[in-house]
Amino acid sequence: MQHDPNCLFCKIIAGQIPSKKVYEDEEIFAFHDIHPHAPVHFLMVPKLHVHSMAGVSDAHAGVLGRMMVLAPRLAMEQGCNPYPDGGFRIVVNTGTEGGQEVHHLHIHVLGGPRPWLKG
């Protein structure tokens, strides 16, 4: 599996940096955000190092699809309330102007009772 030895998220996936794991399988790793913006806030990352959404190709469709299908289940398991009155937000920041701070593709899943709006 391709990884970047200097990447923060690759180090988390490898267990070199501790994290509070939410989920792991052969392609996906999910863990709690260290600076949560909501009562529920975790990140989902592909284990394969991809810099951002700007770098995805058809080859990544499978893992990205699995991440989107997995997100609702993990959101409920982490404490989000059910749809339609509950719910969650999925955010993917891409590039510096898009607010991406770590250049390893990651999906933020945020939810829980409001108010928690921070942008």
Image: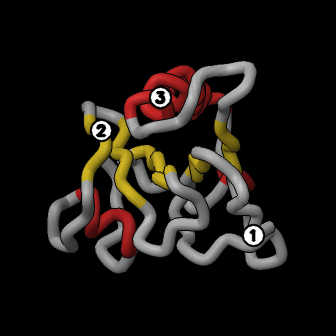
From the viewer's perspective, tell me whether residue 36 is left or right of residue 34. right
From the viewer's perspective, tell me whether residue 24 is left or right of residue 31. left
Q: Please, what secondary structure does the residue beneath circle 2 have?
A: strand
Of circles 3 and 2, the one toward us is 3
Cα separation between marks 3 and 2: 13 Å
> Residue at the location (40% across, 39% down)?
78
Marked residue nearer the N-terminal end (3 or 1) = 3
The C terminus sits in image quarter? bottom right
Q: Which mark is residue 25?
A: none
Say if 51 sits above or below 48 in the image: below
Marked residue nearer the N-terminal end (2 or 1) = 2
Name the residue beneath numbered marker 3.
76
Q: Which mark is residue 23?
A: 2
> Residue at the location (34% across, 59% down)?
3
**Residue type pointed to by label 3:** Met
Foreground residue among 91 and 57: 91
Q: Please, what secondary structure does the residue beneath circle 1 have?
A: loop
For disc 2, the neighbor class at 10 Å (few under 14, some 14 to 19, many from 20) is: some
**Could you tell me residue 9's position as x and y percent?**
38, 65
Q: Are marks 2 and 1 in contact (CB under 8 Å)?
A: no
Based on the displayed image, in which of its 4 quarters is residue 105 positioned? bottom right
Residue located farthest toward the left when viewing the structure as drawn: 15
Marked residue nearer the N-terminal end (3 or 2) = 2
Say if 84 sits above or below 39 in the image: above
**Residue type pointed to by label 1:** Lys
Q: Please, what secondary structure does the residue beneath circle 3 have?
A: helix
> Residue at the location (49% across, 74% down)?
35
Of circles 2 and 1, the one toward us is 1
**Could you tell me residue 104's position as x and y percent?**
51, 62
Q: Which mark is residue 118?
A: 1
> Residue at the location (21% across, 73% down)?
17
Say if 42 sits above or below 79 in the image: below
